[in-house]
């Protein structure tokens, strides 16, 4: 008389089930990381705009005291020797050195001949004059 052994089914996952779950996790992870990278870029742009707005305000304070904007951003921290109105300098106008933008580039500053100024960030591509330059708000 032969006895039958009862086969027990082991608990666990098949290879196909594991691969399917892994594929779903990869798809979800790539979607979430794409969304997070987009949020990071927006955050960097907003940070640069905020810093540029504060930098503009600081330059305007300097211009109110001195009558003209500084020749360079370093003029916000260092008394301009030899300037016509050097005695009016009430600085330093920036407590710390001007920080780099979120992409680790220096903010760009241009003083026009008519006494106007422009300040901007080169943006993520680090090239001035390109489409992704960040301007003050």
Image (spheres, rainbow, N blue to C red):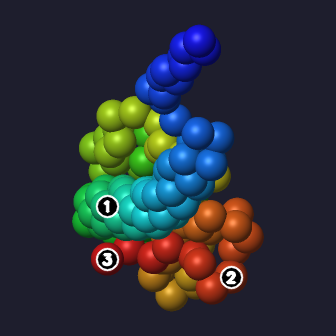
Please give left or right for residue 11 compared with residue 19 in the image: left
Label 3 sits on residue:
137
The secondary structure type at the circle numbered 3 is loop
Label 2 sits on residue:
130
Towards the viewer: 35 or 61 = 35
Density class for disc 1 (Cα within 10 Å; few <14, some 14-19, many ≥20) is: some
What is the C-alpha distance between the residues marked 3 and 1? Answer: 7 Å
Please give left or right for residue 125 compared with residue 84 in the image: right
Q: Contact (CB < 8 A) between labels 3 and 1?
A: yes
What is the C-alpha distance between the residues marked 3 and 2? Answer: 18 Å
Task: Tell me the number on the disc at residue 50.
Answer: 1
In which quarter of the view is residue 125 placed? bottom right
Badge 3 or badge 2: first in the primary sequence: 2
In which quarter of the view is residue 109 placed? bottom right
**x, y (%) of residue 118?**
50, 76
Which residue is at 40% across, 33% downward?
Answer: 96
Q: Residue furthest right?
A: 127
Task: Tell me the number on the disc at residue 92.
Answer: none
Quadrant the N terminus occupies: top right
Towards the viewer: 130 or 120 = 130
Q: Is residue 75 visible?
A: no
Please give left or right for residue 105 compared with residue 66 in the image: right
Towards the viewer: 18 or 38 = 18
Q: Is residue 134 visible?
A: yes
């Amino acid at each position: 008389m032969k006895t039958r052994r009862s086969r027990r089914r082991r608990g666990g996952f098949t290879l196909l089930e594991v691969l399917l779950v892994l594929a779903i996790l990869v798809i979800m992870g790539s979607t979430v990381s794409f969304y997070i990278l987009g949020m990071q870029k927006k955050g960097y742009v907003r940070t640069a705009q905020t810093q540029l707005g504060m930098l503009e305000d600081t330059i305007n304070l300097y211009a109110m005291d001195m009558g003209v904007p500084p020749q360079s951003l370093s003029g916000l921290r260092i008394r301009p020797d030899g300037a016509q109105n050097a005695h009016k300098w009430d600085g330093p106008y920036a407590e710390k050195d001007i920080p780099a933008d979120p992409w680790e580039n220096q903010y760009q500053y241009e003083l026009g001949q008519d006494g106007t100024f422009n300040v901007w960030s080169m943006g993520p591509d680090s090239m001035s004059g390109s489409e992704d330059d960040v301007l003050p708000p």
